[in-house]
Image (cartoon, grey):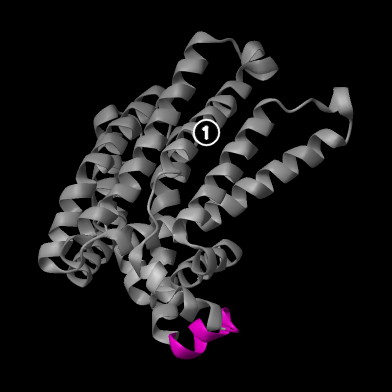
Amino acid sequence: GWLLGRFADLRGRRTAMLLTIVLMAGGSFIIGILPTFGMVGWLAPILLLLARIGQGMSLGGEVSNASAYLAEIAPPERRGRYSAFFYISTGSSVLIASLLGALLTATMTQEELAAYGWRIPFIIGGVLGIVGLWLRRAMPETEQFEENKAKAQQVKHPLLTTLTEHPKAVGQLVAFTLLSTLCYYTFFSALTPFAVTSRGADPGQVFTALSIATALFVLLQYPMGVLSDRFGRKPQLLAWSAATAVLIVPLSSLIGPGLWNMLVVFCVGLGLYTAMTSIAPAVMSELFPTELRGLGIGAW
């Protein structure tokens, strides 16, 4: 986040987003065609590590660069609407990946998956990355970056500058990200194995509930972005935080066997979460000036 955020502040949002998609697609494709340990020995895990490092750098840079880009191309009165497209694409990707996983497990044996089936999603990801690169090549650079790139070049210690000149923004971003990350990994990652292994829920029902809730998550992004443009970011964030604090314990008591129970848990949790995700790029971008925006979001 720090390296590619600074790169975006100096070289442009478009250039940085071309780099992040190359890193992600390249890493995915390398993993998909990776030789086994039996074929090349320790070179295999070394290549895997390098591919994952590239993908990690891509993720760290993509969030800050895409957020800054969306906020900077949007008219101020429609920034929430534009920001919503960040998680519309992210949520759609998660849903497609989950459905692909379900398709592979339904059509292939465990032996086939272990032998070569696991490579298929990575190769598909690499190919889709090339498509994304072709789409991004035609993107214009933002006017705000062009107007402020000279300022960015004059900043000698950008990370220190964010702390000394924008301490409130840094604190707000850290706190905001902590709760957001907690919600993301609770509902998209940790809840599924917990429901199955600790509460005896049926894996198929949990997957179905999560898939429906993810579709709802995608559909609610734009309406929530519109609400923030009309009523403000702060009221929406406060409503999300308060509702999550009040409802998380009652929702936890519903986790267990039964499709409807899990549907309520996922839909309510992810439905509330859209109040934040729909406006996250706008909120983060509005905390820092243009010359520090990429680094400020990425590093903190």
On screen, residue 19 above or below 229: above
Under mark 1, the amino acid is Ile
- Front in this rendered view, residue 149 or 263: 149
- Whether residue 162 appears in magenta in the rendering, the answer is yes
Asked whether residue 182 appears in the rendered view, the answer is: no
Q: Which residues are magenta?
A: 156-166
Q: Residue furthest bottom?
A: 164
- Whether residue 171 appears in magenta in the rendering, the answer is no
Q: Residue furthest right?
A: 41
Disc count in the image?
A: 1
Q: For this view, does 238 lie left or right of residue 106? A: left
Name which residue lies at 15% across and 63% down.
229
| Rendered location of residue 159, percent (x, y) | 56, 79
Magenta span dominant secondary structure: helix
| Rendered location of residue 186, percent (x, y) | 42, 49
The secondary element bearing badge 1 is classed as: helix
Asked whether residue 281 appears in the rendered view, the answer is: yes
On screen, residue 98 above or below 6: above
Residue of label 1: 130
- Front in this rendered view, residue 25 or 242: 25
Name which residue lies at 58% across and 21% down.
120
Q: Quadrant of the N terminus?
A: bottom right
Name which residue lies at 38% across and 28% down.
207
Would you identify the image quadrant in which residue 23 lies? top right
Name which residue lies at 38% across and 43% down.
90
Q: For this view, does 165 lie left or right of residue 75? A: right
